[in-house]
Image (spheres, rainbow, N blue to C red):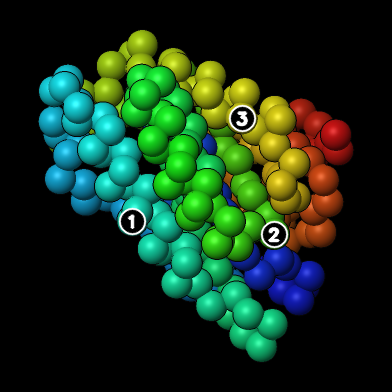
């Protein structure tokens, strides 16, 4: 990628399940020779949550919160460090899911920990939000057929997509690139990937959009 010096030091990729965030984060980290921070996958309470056990949502959410905090707190982003970081999540993502899955009492307790942790963490310079329609994500889930994802029902997936859309509609904490992946496939189509990488290699200020090939390539908000 050209003009690496223009790229932000801390990039985060976000979006709902099966939208391609982990794949894009891996590719960016490889191209930029950056440290890759992966979404925590192991959670001893997750299976119980998917099975609907009482209290499991709160346990699973707190476990994710602590793990995500530990990962991001360990980043070396001081003024003397020249290391670049690419993460496949932002810390705010944890609260998005907490609001979906916890009751009011649980959320009150959760928020106390969340607020304490959040003020200690760095904010990404650039967030890349990958979006797709629920229908596209459902097809990708079915195709992948991962054991841990089989319990994700259609209704819950639609709620997650709506929550992401609402969150990023109001997001102003960092520069933001919104990528609609419903009609592009940067995983299996190299031309789509190269177009996206070229866009990411350019300066991005405020909120910008990367539109599917064949339409207007990018627009500023």
On the image, the x and y values in percent for residue 149 come to: 24, 31
On the image, the x and y values in percent for residue 99 come to: 45, 26
Of helix, strand and loop, which one carries label 2? loop
Which residue occupies 58% across, 56% down? 119
**Residue 136 can be seen, yes or no:** no
- CA–CA distance between discs 2 and 1? 22 Å
Q: Considering only vertical position in the picture, is 178 above or below 164?
A: below
Q: Which is nearer the eye, 173 or 133?
A: 173
Is the residue under label 1 in contact with that under label 2 (CB below 8 Å)?
A: no
**Which disc is residue 167 wearing?**
3
Q: Which is nearer the eye, 25 or 115?
A: 115
Give the mark, 3 or 1, whose residue is nearer the N terminus. Answer: 1
Give the mark, 3 or 2, whose residue is nearer the N terminus. Answer: 2
- Quadrant including the N terminus: bottom right
Of helix, strand and loop, which one carries label 3? helix
Is the residue under label 1 in contact with that under label 3 (CB below 8 Å)?
A: no
**According to the image, label 1 marks what residue?**
67
**Residue 67 can be seen, yes or no:** yes
Few, some or many residues within 10 Å of mark 3 (<14, 14–19, 20+): some
**According to the image, label 2 marks what residue?**
125
Is 58 on the left-hand or right-hand side of 217? left
Which residue occupies 48% across, 54% down? 117
Of helix, strand and loop, which one carries label 1? helix
On the image, the x and y values in percent for residue 210 come to: 72, 39
In the picture as drawn, the residue positioned furthest to the top comes out as 155
Which residue occupies 70% across, 37% down? 171
- Quadrant including the C terminus: top right
- CA–CA distance between discs 3 and 2? 17 Å
């Amino acid at each position: 990628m050209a003009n690496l010096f223009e790229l932000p030091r801390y990039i985060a990729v976000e979006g709902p399940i099966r939208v391609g965030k982990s794949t894009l984060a891996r590719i960016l980290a490889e191209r930029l020779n950056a440290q890759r921070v992966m979404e925590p996958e192991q959670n001893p309470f997750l299976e119980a949550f998917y099975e609907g056990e009482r209290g499991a949502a709160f346990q699973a959410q707190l476990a994710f919160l602590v793990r995500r905090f530990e990962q991001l707190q360990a980043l070396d982003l001081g003024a003397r460090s020249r290391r670049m970081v690419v993460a496949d999540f932002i810390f705010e993502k944890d609260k998005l899911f907490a609001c979906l899955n916890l009751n009011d009492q649980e959320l009150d307790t959760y928020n106390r920990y969340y607020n304490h942790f959040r003020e200690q963490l760095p904010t990404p310079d650039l967030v890349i939000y990958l979006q797709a329609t629920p229908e596209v994500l459902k097809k990708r889930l079915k195709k992948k057929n991962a054991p841990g994802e089989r319990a994700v029902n259609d209704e819950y997936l639609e709620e997650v997509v709506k929550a992401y859309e609402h969150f990023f509609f109001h997001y102003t904490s960092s520069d933001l690139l919104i990528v609609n992946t419903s009609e592009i496939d940067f995983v299996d189509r190299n031309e789509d990937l190269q177009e996206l990488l070229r866009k990411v290699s350019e300066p991005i200020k405020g909120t910008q959009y990367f539109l599917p090939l064949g339409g207007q390539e990018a627009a500023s908000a």
